[in-house]
Amino acid sequence: MKEVVLALPTLAFTVATRAALGVGIGLLVSEHIPVGRRRRIGGALVALGAATTVPILMTVRRSVRSSGTRRGIGVGQSEELIGATRFARKGDDELV
């Protein structure tokens, strides 16, 4: 399973630019605003959304994490130790 871990500002930037792209496309296809104004505003929003697509994709791609490491082994595990028995150590019985 893969996870995408984004910082809050990055997530907000992503959502805002995707919303601008959607609103821009909506303005270009709507007929409630005069044509000249609609094309200027819609074109600017679509251009903003399109221009930010590549940086956002690169950021999201860098933040994708697998559930294990690249070889499918969990964090802190070694191939030599898989299946090994762990014996109790001093202090293990004190864990709550």
Image (spheres, grey):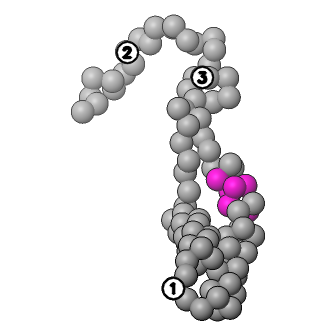
Q: Is residue 57 magenta?
A: yes
**Residue segment shown in magenta:** 55-60
Q: Earlier in the sequence, mark 2 or mark 3?
A: 3
Q: Residue at x 55, y 89 (%)?
A: 33
Q: Nearer the viewer, mark 2 or mark 1?
A: 1
Q: Dividing the picture into quarters, in which one does residue 59 lie?
A: bottom right
Image position of 68 with respect to 88: above or below: below
Q: Earlier in the sequence, mark 2 or mark 1?
A: 1
Residue 81 in the image: state x and y as whole percent: 57, 12
Q: From the image, tell me which residue sits under label 2.
A: 88
Q: Report the magenta stretch's main SS.
A: helix
**Which residue type carries mark 1?**
His
Q: Furthest-left residue in view?
A: 96
Q: Dividing the picture into quarters, in which one does residue 66 lie?
A: top right
Q: Nearer the viewer, mark 1 or mark 3?
A: 1
Q: Residues within 10 Å of mark 3 (few under 14, many from 20)?
A: few
Image quarter in which the C terminus is found: top left
Secondary element under disc 1, as helix, strand or loop, is loop
Check contact, mark 2 vs mark 1: CB within 8 A. Answer: no
Secondary element under disc 2, as helix, strand or loop, is loop
Q: Is any part of residue 41 visible from this angle?
A: no
Q: From the image, tell me which residue sits under label 3.
A: 73
Residue 13 in the image: state x and y as whole percent: 58, 70
In the image, taking residue 9 as reference, residue 45 lies left or right, namely right
Residue 92 versus residue 27: which sits nearer the camera?
27
Q: From the image, tell me which residue sits under label 1.
A: 32
Q: Is residue 90 magenta?
A: no
Q: Residue at x 41, y 11 (%)?
A: 87
Q: Earlier in the sequence, mark 1 or mark 3?
A: 1
Secondary element under disc 3, as helix, strand or loop, is loop
**Which residue type carries mark 2?**
Ala
